[in-house]
Image (cartoon, rainbow, N blue to C red):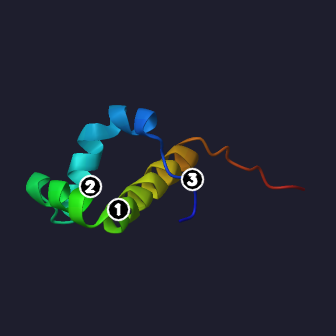
Amino acid sequence: MKYRILSSKELEPLKDDFIKFLSANTVTGEDWAKIKSNKPNEALKLVEIFSDIVWEKALDKNKIPRTPRR
């Protein structure tokens, strides 16, 4: 994990994006429920990966272009 994991409060507004992320990783809603119940470490790993993606996008969006020094 490169950044910190997003809190439940931070993840809530990103619910639709998380569902798309799971879907892109071939995880259905039913699969997700099973993973959370039976494989909590795997569920946490998916949330960590998603959190890193969110942080990367946020940081990239807020980058200030550097001007070359003379």
Q: Amino acid at mark 3?
A: Arg
Q: Residue at x 33, y 68 (%)?
A: 42
Residue picked out by circle 1:
46
Numbered mark located on residue 70 in the image = none
What is the quadrant of the C terminus in the image? bottom right
Is residue 23 something one can see in this rendering? Answer: no
Q: Position of residue 40 (x, y in %)?
A: 32, 62
> Pointer 1: residues within 10 angstroms few (<14), some, or many (20+)?
some
Find residue 11 and report its horizontal and vertical position in percent: 39, 39
- Comparing labels 2 and 3, the label whose residue is closer to the camera: 3
Q: Earlier in the sequence, mark 2 or mark 1?
A: 2
Residue 21: which disc? 2
Query: What residue is rendered at 32% in x and 61% in y?
Result: 43
Q: Secondary structure at mark 1?
A: helix
Q: Nearer the viewer, residue 55 or 61?
A: 55
Residue 4's disc is 3
Q: Nearer the viewer, mark 2 or mark 1?
A: 1
Considering every residue shown, the one lying at the far front of the view is 38
Mark 1: amino acid: Leu
Give the amino acid at mark 2. Phe
Picture coordinates of residue 22, whole percent (x, y): 23, 57
Decide which of tag 2 and tag 3 comes sooner along the chain: 3
Q: Are marks 2 and 1 in contact (CB under 8 Å)?
A: yes
> Which residue appears at 47% of the width and 41% of the height?
7
